[in-house]
Amino acid sequence: MTTFRIKRYNPEKQPEPYFEEFKVDATEGITVLDCLNDIKWTQDGTLSYRMSCRSAICGSCAVKANGHAILACQRQAEHIADKDDTVTIEPLGNMKPIKDLVVDFKPFWDKIDKVKPYLHNDTPAPEKERTQSPEEFRLIDDASTCIMCGACYSDCNVLEVDDNFLGPAALAKAQRFVGDSRDKSTLERVKELSEPGGIWDCTHCGECVERCPKPAQPFYRIKEVMASALEEGVHNNNGARHALSFTKSVKHSGRLNENQIPVESVGFFNIKGLLELIPIGIRMLLKGKTPPILHRSIKEADDVKRIYRELGE
Amino acid sequence: MIKHDVVIVGSGLAGMRAALEVCKELDVAVLSKVYPTRSHSGAAQGGIAASLGNVESDSWEEHMFDTIKGGDYLNDQDAVEEYVKAAPRVIYELERMGCVFSRTADGKIAQRSFGGHSKPRACFSADRTGHAVLHALHEQILKESKSIKIYSEWSMHSLTIEDGQCKGIVVSNIRTGEVEVIQGKAVIFATGGYGRVFKITSNAFASTADGAIAAFDAGLPIEDAEFVQFHPSGLYRQGILFSEAARGEGGYLVNGNGERFMEKYAPSRMELAPRDIVARAEQSEIDAGRGGGGKGPGEGFINLDLRHLGEARIMERLPQIRQLGIDFIGVDCIKDPLPIQPTAHYSMGGIPTDMFGQVIVDSEGTHMPGFFAAGECACVSVHGGNRLGTNSLLEAVVFGERAGKAALEYARKTGFEKINESHQKTKVLKVMEEVYQSDGTESYNDIRNEMKEIMMANCGVFRDEDRLKECVDTLQKLQVRFKKGKVTDKGKLFNTEIYEILELSNMLKMAEIISTAALNRKESRGGHFRTDHDKRDDENFLKHSMLSKSEDNSIDIKYKPVVITKYQPKERTY
Ligand SMILES: Cc1cc2nc3c(=O)[nH]c(=O)nc-3n(C[C@H](O)[C@H](O)[C@H](O)COP(=O)(O)OP(=O)(O)OC[C@H]3O[C@@H](n4cnc5c(N)ncnc54)[C@H](O)[C@@H]3O)c2cc1C
Ligand code: SF4
Ligand code: SF4
Ligand code: FES
């Protein structure tokens, strides 16, 4: 029997959330969602959560399991349970709980809306389709797999401290248009996305890549938008803002301390992500434009030197 | 009371496409019990049909013929013609909206083969076509957000028909439990299918027949309910789908003895024969003990073998399917075959409409003023007795647009009539209150499971008189037991238990309608197969069934003629 510790919350009855335990026979092939259903249908009908497709495509069922956002329908319970055969289920983070595992997605959708998530192309349409090569399709293929589940939003470090950050899903959605060969507003888009709350406020922590159940993988998309912004000559003229939110987030989550941790241990994603941007930055430099991308922690002369050395090899 | 010129229930492809039409001139509301992008359309994997001819030359005539043959000649051919002719245009429109499609080397929309289609006609976006189209439409809805009001996580309970005219709907906000009347000059239902009445199904939890039953309760008929499509490749036990694209790309079906058994059942089309034929072949193999696992309906499996396609092709064309196998049963289809079984997938029947989405109330085609339906909840009928893969996303888009246009046209000429708000609201409040107060001894969960079991076993791929009689009988008893259920959540806030119980009530009724229609169709055609009447019988049954509520609350059965224009019924072989 697997123990499910579920965070319960019903402000109609009691203002504070609490944990309640249920036992479920989670045999092989049983998903976390199957377990929640088993609890609701045979033990306690008052448990509320969202679900619909059961096949990891509608994005309804994201919850936190043992501290990290997952799609309940996509994961088998036995793969999630810890060594005591326990699964702790909580609502997604960074959004207000409504009841039990149901959270208010309004800020999430508002931010999606902010990136003007629709194709812009006023040129006269051809009689048939607008052509797009398979290579061009591939540039938006990953971003377009996003199912708007909010797993990335839930676990993003910046959102924990900065409500204004558009967040990983909205930025991934933005890449879907920035990268679309049919879209005619790339420059305006990357300008807007470089405003406060946009791409440069991401701290490259890579958490969203870990959490994303689809190939959408927001941080990689964010990097692509950063690259497009640099290519388009749009600079971040407020690097401090970025550094600040990073510091804040680190302070808040306590996961990283950039002053103490040498750069190579800041995390795989961090370094790799920045490294990939550097060549573009250098190209910009050569064109007489300043690369704005360098993160405060790697602005330290030694680290920058090291990165350049690695690049040269 | 809330008022909108046009009210649409459902935000799948059909509902959103309709909204984009109406919003050009009038104020429109879209109501959905799940957030729009969570609608079931997003689960569609394989493709959307149109004779673009991007890969091989193709024509609407061929698309039309394939559709009619696939539907076993029960399709209304005038509607099919309009529908296949519109297909290329609506696909180009979706593309211009920004829909992401996989491409050919020369940049056109890529197309692939699909069961029952004689040409590669399925436009696709890898293996998540429904998702791509759903999100493209949702993007347009966000763009038009000034003229489209979305009621997300609101549920429709009943349809308001007064003085022979549709005037609105009664709804509730799932978050607060509050009941409201929404008045509309026109109402469009786009509420999707009802596969959830079966134990093994590919359908989402939201596909529960709410729309069909609201119409039925308002006195309208349900057409061709007996025609349910069983998809050949549902994941064993879970029922979730491995797209037919897996076979379109060249996958094999193999029984427990390692034989490609389709040789015996459809030697020319093999794995790509239409779904009803493949599902029956699988079920026959399983029933004969040549599958894996158990025997009989709902038990046992067949292997879907993709290994010979190779990793590169699987990764390019079927990445999501591969991931589903890995996540849900730990099988990587690059290395091992996937265990599958027939799964209840698509409802050919539904609320009868003409080819403009206008709901009709009888066999003569009389209109119900102000009421329109489109998508899977409607029966036009373009699919006849069996829908071809990729034809239903197309249906949702084509008839979503048409219903939107027709509703717009109608609402423009109509005012807000007087509506008896308190009466309509009280009726729904009373039903809800009964559920809230239910404190009996029966478990709703048991009732739901028993319904699903009996529908799968007795009204599934193979049916016969005895099993169907038992099925109807059981369902009637379950409806009695339903009245003695017990609810645990008495709160108003996001009370999903109450909504599940209301859905169960709709499903019990729908299951009875399906099995009653099946009992009365004493022939085999398309998705409906009677082992005791195993031939098609055009003399007696080349007609649509129309089931409605009779005076004494039992079910009344009538029939409606099939429209035949170009293609005379012929024997259907593949
Ligand atoms: C797994 C799977 C794969 C498929 N693949 C394909 C494919 O490749 N090609 C193809 O052509 N077809 C495919 N189909 C079929 C196709 O997806 C559906 O027929 C089609 O998407 C139906 O669209 P719709 O707009 O009619 O309804 P849906 O998308 O089902 O939407 C129904 C809407 O109604 C709302 N609703 C229902 N009841 C209520 C209520 N009481 N109150 C408020 N709102 C309500 C829901 O919230 C939802 O928004 C597939 C189906 C499945 C299950
Ligand atoms: S990489 Fe950026 S967007 Fe992703 S979780 Fe970290 S801070 Fe948030
Ligand atoms: S980017 Fe990934 S995690 Fe974020 S909402 Fe989309 S699918 Fe979910
Ligand atoms: S239920 Fe749809 S993603 Fe899990």
Image: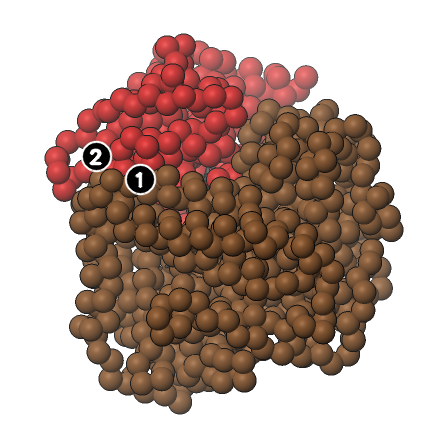
Colour brown, chain: B
Mark 1 crowd level (few <14, some 14–19, many ≥20, 10 Å Cα):
some
Quadrant showing the N terminus of chain A: top left
Colour red, chain: A
Residue B129 visible in image: no
Q: Is mark 1 within 8 Å of ligand 1?
A: no
Q: Residue at x 81, y 47 (%)?
A: B265
Query: For numbered disc 1, what is the local secondary structure?
Result: loop
Residue B400 coordinates in the image, percent (x, y): 53, 69
**Amino acid type, mark 2:** Tyr
Q: Residue at x 21, y 34 (%)?
A: A9
Residue B98 coordinates in the image, percent (x, y): 58, 59
Whether pointer 1 and pointer 2 mark residues with C-beta atoms closer than 8 Å, the reply is no
Residue A92 coordinates in the image, percent (x, y): 34, 34
Residue B180 visible in image: yes
Q: Residue at x 51, y 21 (%)?
A: A28
- Which dot marks residue B443? 1
**Amino acid type, mark 1:** Ser
Left of B232 or right of it: where is B447? left
Q: Which residue is mark 2?
A: A9
Quadrant showing the C terminus of chain A: top right
Query: For numbered disc 2, what is the local secondary structure?
Result: strand
